[in-house]
Amino acid sequence: MNLIQFLDSNGQRAVGVVEGASARRLNDATSVYDLAISAFQTDTGLGALVKKMGLGDTIDRDLILAEGRMLAPIDHPDPAHLYLTGTGLTHLGSASTRDAMHTANTGSSEAGLTDTMKMFRMGLENGKPADGEKGVQPEWFYKGNGYSIIAPGHPIPSPAFALDAGEEPEIAGIYVIDQHGQPRRLGFAIANEFSDHVTERVNYLYLAHSKLRACSFGPEMRVGDLPAHIEGTSKIVRNGETIWEKPFLSGEDNMSHTIANLEYHHFKYDLFRTPGDVHVHMFGTATLSFADGISTKPGDVFEIEESQFGAALRNPIRIDQETPVTVGNIY
C-alpha cells in the first residue's frame, strides 16, 4: 500500500491510497501527518486505520501529477517542525566519486587515504552490527526544513550563488515522533537529494554548504519495510531528449550500513525526538550524473523511478535570481 497527498479538483487537500494500478481517495482524510497522529493516539497501525476509514472515489494519479496537484507524501502544519536530513557514504561504491573529487584537490592524504575513504571503510567494517550492538556512525548532514520541500512535478530551485545543480537519487525514510518521544517510521519514498557537487569539490568541508538546497520526494510513500534490493533508474531529460540515464541501487543488499544503524545514529540525539516533529531522512546513493561529467541546465528534468515505489518522481530545474541579503541591527 502506498499513500499520496494531493489537491482535488476543487483545490482541497486529500489523501489517496494506491495499490497497483488502482488509486482511490481515503475517506475523511486530508493529511498523512494527521493519520499518523491518529494512529499513535489509538495505538493502530496505518494499514488498519486506512481500512477502518474506508476508500471512496477512484482517482487518476497520473492526471493529478500532470496537472501539478500532487503534494509531497507527508508535510507538517508548521513546516519548521519538519527536518530534512541525510547520510552519505552508505552504499557500496558510493565513495568513488567523492574520493575522486577530494583527492583531486588535496592529493593523497598522509595515511594514503582521503577522509572519504576512511569513513567509507568504517562503514564497511562496522555499518552492519549484530542485533543489540551499536555500529559505526555515518557521515550526516542537514538539508533544511519543510520550507525546502518541492512537490513532485514542480521546479526545484537552485540558488543564484550555486555552482552546480545536480540530482542524487535516493530512498528517504519518513518518520513522525510520537507523544512519548519515540520515532515511528511510516514508510519510505523515492527522493531527489538535490546538491551542489561543484561547491563540495572545492573542499570537502564545504559539504554542509552543498547540501543546503531544496529537494523533492515522493510522489508516493510506500508503507512498510524497505525492500532489501532496490534497482531503479535515474535520468536527465533536456528538451524532450534523454541526455543521461543510469540505474541506481539501494536497499540493504547494496548498502554498507543497515537502515537500523542509520536510524539509531540520527535519532540518538534528543533534539530529534521532539513529539510531533516529522523527519524525512535520506539514506544516500552511489549514482549521480555529476560523476559522468554532466552539467545540468535550467529546464532540465530529473526523472527518478523504481517500480516498487509507484509513480516516477519528476522535477525540472529552475535557477533563482540573486536575493540581496542585508544584516541590520536593532541595538
Image (cartoon, rainbow, N blue to C red):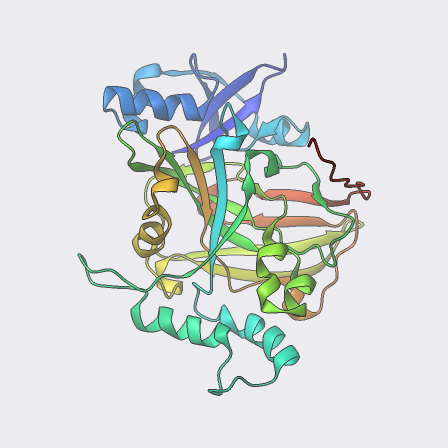
Camera-nearest residue between 140 and 228: 140
Q: Quadrant of the C terminus?
A: top right
Residue reaching furthest front? Answer: 331
301 above or below 184? below
Camera-nearest residue between 187 and 66: 187
Residue pictured at 32% horizontal, 58% vertical: 258
299 above or below 90? above
Q: Quadrant of the N terminus?
A: top left
Residue pictured at 45% horizontal, 46% vertical: 281
Q: Quadrant of residue 245?
A: bottom right
Rendered location of residue 100, percent (x, y)? 59, 77
Residue pictured at 36% horizontal, 16% vertical: 54
Rendered location of residue 235, percent (x, y)? 64, 55
Residue pictured at 50% horizontal, 87% vertical: 110
Residue 74 in view, yes or no: no
Rendered location of residue 188, percent (x, y)? 42, 42
Looking at the image, residue 103 sits to the left or right of residue 159; the answer is left
Camera-nearest residue between 95 and 211: 211
Residue 44 in view, yes or no: yes
Rendered location of residue 307, percent (x, y)? 48, 47
